[in-house]
Image (spheres, rainbow, N blue to C red):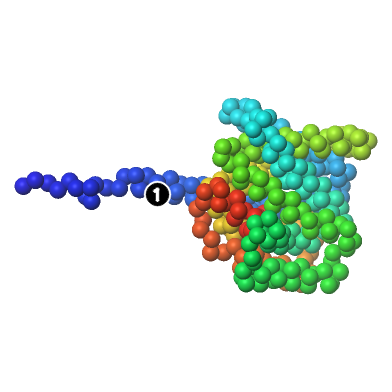
Amino acid sequence: MPTDISAASVPPAGNETATAIRARAFQVGVTLCIINTIIGAGQPVITRWGAVHLDPLLFCTSAVVFASICTIPVLYFSGELRMIVDPRYRARLFMMSMAGTVMTSLTLTYGLTRIDAIAGVLLLQTEPVYSLILSTIFVGERPSARQMLATVTILVGIGSVFAGGSFSPLWAAALVFTTPLFWQTSHVLGLKLMPPLTPISVTGGRFFYAAIILTVMLLIFRRGSLVQLADPTSLGVIAVTGLFIYFLSALTWFGAINRLSLAWVTALVVPGIPILSILFAVMFLGEHATTREAIGILISVSGVLALVLGADPHRKQPASEAVEAIHEPMT
């Protein structure tokens, strides 16, 4: 009796392979998200230390230069070093560098010279607000009721702390408040470069151009501060900041959003950062969150969760995800 070998009885090997690839991407992506959350939680704390104990421009410039040095061997051995100066990509890499590293380093570092780390954590939850503004202005989307409610919730959380006087002076709070706008702009530009570029190429390009700009600024405006680099403790903090807060943070973030949906990555990363940041601030800086600050952070985090939960974890096509990147929050 002949055996039925119709197409219906053949195992869908192609589908199984695709499923395995997606599962692997999910596992790696989640691991990168967890690492990024831990590193991200340390950013306000270590930046606050550097901003208070060192010249702010020296601190952020040295950290970015160290991060750039970390990327060079990786780019060289992977054969991607030439990509960061490729005429096809260097203009976009430069713009991403200016927004995501130069501006964020300056606004966050100088803001945290006067704002404590716990208050800074709360101010950094403003990214969904910028998401809503960018999607309305540049994409022409009408905000949904859920988006509006979530955004109002975030602002209520921040406003409740503002009423208590924790954000003083206002100029420093404003610098920290605007930092997520530049982060988000950088993430949008980065997504449009992956593919064809890999996460390490995007990370390397981001720090390469930023290191040049910040070094020139340091030599022009704060050359006398270079003597602070003679202190071993200062050098150690700068090295840790450059390696972990800048290099590994950017690499794990771009690696995660290269595999998973940007909105889903955000939903996993964002809530954990403020909780861990407060813990780190208490442990390493001796800061203590007031009841008003703790409540404000919980309210803001609930707004972020309301905005991004329910998203598909798998990455969409680059063209559509670039739009998604504008109207979903990012860390």
Q: Give residue 58's quadrant in the image.
A: top right
Can you say which quadrant of the picture contains the C terminus?
A: bottom right
Question: Relative to the observer, which residue lies in front, 168 or 151?
Answer: 151
Where is 85 relative to 26, above or below? above
Q: Is residue 274 visible?
A: no
Direction right: furthest residue = 224
Q: Label 1, on which residue? A: 19
Q: Measuring 82% from the left and 50% from the top, which residue is drawn there?
A: 107
Q: Label 1 crowding class (10 Å Cα cut-off): few <14, some 14-19, many 20+? A: few
Q: Give residue 281's quadrant in the image.
A: bottom right
Direction front: furthest residue = 140
Q: Position of residue 108 (x, y in %)?
A: 80, 51
Q: Is residue 172 left or right of residue 138?
A: right
Q: Secondary structure at mark 1?
A: helix
Question: Relative to the observer, which residue lies in front, 228 or 154?
Answer: 154
Where is 63 relative to 42, above or below? above
Q: Position of residue 267 (x, y in %)?
A: 59, 60
Residue type at numbered disc 1: Thr
Q: How many marks?
A: 1
Q: Measuring 74% from the left and 35% from the top, which residue is drawn there?
A: 209
Q: Position of residue 269 (x, y in %)?
A: 62, 56
Q: Measuring 66% from the left and 45% from the top, which residue is drawn there?
A: 189
Q: Position of residue 275 (x, y in %)?
A: 68, 62
Q: Is residue 193 visible?
A: yes
Q: Measuring 86% from the left and 69% from the top, which residue is drawn there?
A: 165
Q: Is residue 20 left or right of residue 80?
A: left
Q: Is residue 123 left or right of residue 331?
A: right
